[in-house]
Amino acid sequence: MADITAARSAQTGVGARGGMRRWLPALPGVLYVVTFVVGFMMVNTPNDDESNKTWVDYFADRGHQIQVLVSGFLLVIAGMLLLTFLTRLHGRVYAARRSEDRDPLPLVAAAAAGGLVATGGIIAATVPGAMIFGNLHVPGADILRLTSDMSFPLIAVGGGFAVAVAIAIITRAAQRSGYFGRALSIFSYVAVAAAVASFMFFPIAVVLIWVLVVSVVLARRPALA
C-alpha cells in the first residue's frame, strides 16, 4: 500500500513538473505584457503645452525621478522579453523546416523591435538617472520635453513597425504550416495593422492581447515535427 501511495505521489510530482514546463514558453510573452504596461503607464509626465515651470518642478521631485527611472528599467526588460517571445515563436513555427529554409527576417525584426523598446526606456531614464546617481541639476524644460518625446516614437513607431514585420512574416509561415488556425491568423493580421498604427497609442492594446493569446498557444501547442 505504501509503495502504491509513493508511486502515485511520484507520478503527481512528475505531472506537476511537466505542466509547469509546458507553460514555460508562455512566460516571456506574459512578462513582456506586464513589464511593458507597468513601465509605460507608471509615468505621467506633463503635456508638451504645459509651462516650463511645470516640467522643471515635475523632474525636480525625487519621487518622480525614481518613478521615471524605474519605468525606463522596466521598458528595457520588456524589450528583452519581446525579443525572447518572438524568437521562441519563430523557432516553433519554423521547427519543421531545415535551417537553410528558415526565414531570418522575423528574427532581425524581433531584434529591432526589442532594441527600440529598450532604447526608448533608456532615453526616458537618462535624465532622472543622471540626477539621482550623478551631479546633474534639473535641465531646461526643452531638454525634458525632448527626452520625453523621443521615447514614445522609438517604442511605438520604430518598435511598432518592427513588430508588425515580425508578426506578418511569422503568421504567413504559421498559416501555411498549420501552426496557426484561420481565426488566429486573421487576428494576427489585425495585430499587424495595430502595430503599424501604434503611434496612435490605443492600437498598442491589440498587440499586447495578441502576445497573450499566442503565449497560450505556445504553451499548449508543441512545435511541428
Image (cartoon, rainbow, N blue to C red):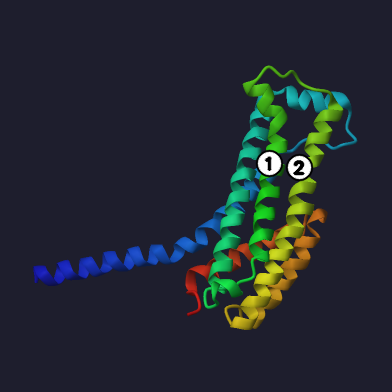
Tell me residue 65's x, y (percent): 68, 28
Residue 90 occupies which quadrant of the picture? bottom right
User: How many residues crowd mark 2 within 10 Å: few (<14), some (14–19), many (20+)?
Assistant: many
Q: Which residue is mark 2?
A: 151
Distance from disc 1 to disc 2, alpha carbons, whole Å, reads 7 Å
Please report whichever mark, 1 or 2, sits nearer to the chain's N-terminal start: 1
Would you say 199 lies left or right of 110 here? right
Residue 2 occupies which quadrant of the picture? bottom left
On screen, 190 above or below 70?
A: below
Which residue is at a point 81% across and 54% down the rendered structure image? 199
Q: Quadrant of the N terminus?
A: bottom left
User: Viewer-proximal residue, 70 or 79?
Assistant: 79
Mark 1: secondary structure: helix
Q: Amino acid at mark 2?
A: Ser
Q: Amino acid at mark 1?
A: Gly
Which residue is at a point 72% across and 37% down the rendered structure image? 123
Label number found at residue 121:
1
Tell me residue 180's x, y (percent): 60, 78
Would you say 182 lies left or right of 7 here? right
Tell me residue 184's x, y (percent): 64, 76
User: How many residues crowd mark 1 within 10 Å: few (<14), some (14–19), many (20+)?
Assistant: many
Residue 93 occupies which quadrant of the picture? bottom right
Mark 1 near mark 2, Cβ–Cβ under 8 Å?
Answer: yes
Residue lying at the far left of the rendered structure: 1
Mark 2: secondary structure: helix
